[in-house]
Amino acid sequence: MRRRELLVSTGLACTLVGCVGGKEDPGSSEEPEESDEPSAPTEEPDRPEEGERVEIVESGLVRRDVGTDEETVSVRGVVVPREGVEVSYVEVRASFYDTEGGLLDTTIEQVEIDESERWEFEVTYPQVGERAAEVGTYELEVGTEL
């Protein structure tokens, strides 16, 4: 499980670096090269991006045993495949944040599905009691490839 989390974290970090991209030095005078020839597509045009293959249609924070040493917090939701897309594996990554926006922890749930129309998921924060009470918000990401 830790190996999969490491792989997903590494992939996410690489994706973010690619999306954000670095800016060149302000003193750099290099101009981008232009060409009259069309560039080759970098992806298959008919295949949706990984995050576009499924969609989270509902989600919410669920607390149990509030105010006790047994308090737990989780995110429940529903994922559905986009129209015309076949999916056999779905992964939901929940990042839990405190009320000030600090990242507390990230947890992943995954399932192999049989052309199901929807997958009801629950991703549970790994701590209980006071630590679970610190959770204020969450973010969800979905993936569909191993």
Image: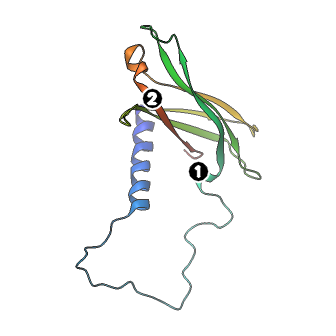
Q: Quadrant of the C terminus?
A: top right
Q: Earlier in the sequence, mark 2 or mark 1?
A: 1
Pointer 2 with pointer 1, Cβ within 8 A: no
Q: Amino acid at mark 2?
A: Gly
Q: Nearer the viewer, residue 106 or 47?
A: 106
Dividing the picture into quadrants, the one containing residue 104 is: top left
Dividing the picture into quadrants, the one containing residue 68 is: top left
What is the crowding at mark 1: few (fewer than 14 residues within 10 Å), some, or many (at least 20)? few
In the displayed structure, does residue 123 sit left or right of residue 121? left
Q: Which mark is residue 51?
A: 1
The location of residue 124, given as percent across then percent down, is 51, 24
Farthest residue to the left: give it.
Answer: 27
Q: Amino acid at mark 1?
A: Gly
Element under disc 2:
strand
Question: Residue tagged by mark 2?
Answer: 136
Dividing the picture into quadrants, the one containing residue 41 is: bottom right
The location of residue 5, given as percent across then percent down, is 43, 37
Mark 2–mark 1 Cα distance, whole angstroms, equals 25 Å
- Residue displayed at 65% across by 67% down: 45
Q: Nearer the viewer, residue 55 or 4?
A: 55
